[in-house]
Image (cartoon, rainbow, N blue to C red):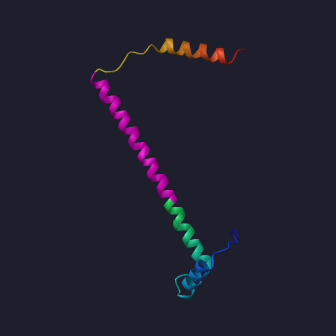
Amino acid sequence: MTQVAIQLPDDLSQFVNESVQAGDFPTADEFFIHAVSIYKDQIESQFREADATKLERLRQDIQTAADQLDRGEGIEMDWEAKRARLHRDHAARHPA
């Protein structure tokens, strides 16, 4: 375990001490372990929610594109011409 030293304002220090004295936590260390664990869980939950939101948006975009294709709104793509253009562009940026 890593030891961390912190300085607290008097009112927060008093709150921690009162919580320990009341039996809410066996030690001040346990108080802070609990507080940091709660904060960590909140942050991780926010990241999971953000990822879920991004995934849902991606699914919606894919469904929109599939619906457009079903309606015949897609366009033909000349993949060979695109590949050739990409190769030309790359060669122009990176001459041998």
Q: Is residue 91 above or below residue 30?
A: above
The residue lying toward the viewer, choosing from 63 and 10, is: 10
- Among the 4 quarters of the image, the one containing residue 65: top left
Q: Is residue 49 above or below residue 42?
A: above
Furthest residue to the right? Answer: 96
Total labels drawn: 0
Furthest residue to the bottom? Answer: 21
- Among the 4 quarters of the image, the one containing residue 16: bottom right
What range of the chain is rendered magenta?
Answer: 43-71
Residue shown at 59% from the left, 72% from the top: 33
Instruction: Please tell me whether residue 7 belongs to the stretch shown in magenta.
Output: no
Residue shown at 67% from the left, 73% from the top: 7
Q: Main secondary structure of the magenta part?
A: helix
Q: Is residue 26 above or below residue 74?
A: below
Q: Is residue 80 left or right of residue 3?
A: left
Please state the horizontal and vertical placement of residue 92, each as a whole percent of the image.
65, 14
Please state the horizontal and vertical placement of residue 36, each as a whole percent of the image.
57, 68
Furthest residue to the front? Answer: 10
Residue shown at 27% from the left, 23% from the top: 71
Instruction: Please tell me whether residue 49 belongs to the stretch shown in magenta.
Output: yes
Give the position of the N terminus as an image quadrant. bottom right
Please state the horizontal and vertical placement of residue 94, each as a whole percent of the image.
68, 18
Please state the horizontal and vertical placement of residue 18, each as a whole percent of the image.
56, 85
Residue shown at 59% from the left, 77% from the top: 30
Give the position of the C terminus as an image quadrant. top right
Q: Is residue 3 left or right of residue 35?
A: right
The residue lying toward the viewer, choosing from 78 and 18, is: 18
